[in-house]
Amino acid sequence: MSAYAVIESGGKQYRVAEGDIVELEKLDAEEGAVVTFDNVLASSTGDSLTLDAGTVTGEVVSQFRGPKLLSFKKKRRKGYTRRVGHRQSLTKVKITGLS
C-alpha cells in the first residue's frame, strides 16, 4: 500500500497521495504558490496509520469555477416556479509532499 494522508480543507475531507491533483474550495493563493495543509486528520506510510500528525504540501495549479448547478423549485397548481444557478469557485492543487 502506498503512503497517503487525509486532510481537511473547506469543511470537507480529502484522501490524498503524493502526485495527486485535487479540486478544493477556493484558497487565497496565486497560481504556482506553495500551500501547506496543517489540518491532517490521518497519515499512513503504507503499513501503519498515524492520527493527527504531519503536514501536507501542495502547489496551486489553477483557480477556476466549477460547473453551473441549478436549483429548481415548483409548487403545483400555484403558478410558482423558481430557478437559481450557482457556480462554485475552486482551486486545483497538486500534492507535492507528505510528512
Image (cartoon, rainbow, N blue to C red):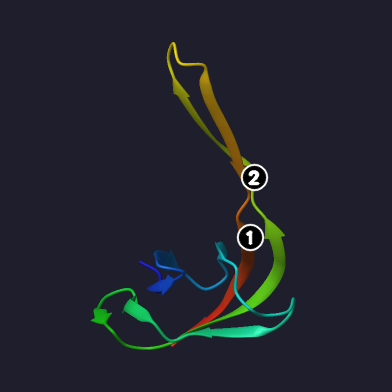
Q: Secondary structure at mark 1?
A: strand
Mark drawn on residue 18: none
Q: Secondary structure at mark 2?
A: loop
Crowdedness near tag 2: few (<14), some (14–19) or many (≥20) residues, C-alpha within 10 Å: few
Q: Is residue 15 visible?
A: yes
Q: Quadrant of the N terminus?
A: bottom left
Q: Is residue 44 visible?
A: no
- Which of these two is toward me, 10 or 93? 10
* Residue wearing tag 1: 89
Residue 47, quarter of the rendered image: bottom left
Q: Quadrant of the C terminus?
A: bottom left
Q: Is residue 49 rendered to the left or right of residue 85?
A: left
Q: Amino acid at mark 2?
A: Pro
CB atoms of marks 2 and 1 within 8 Å: no
Point out residue 23 in the picture as x, y percentages from the top left corner.
Answer: 57, 61
Q: Amino acid at mark 1?
A: Ser
* Residue wearing tag 2: 67
Point out the tag, 2 or 1, that comes first from the N-terminus: 2
Residue 88, quarter of the rendered image: bottom right
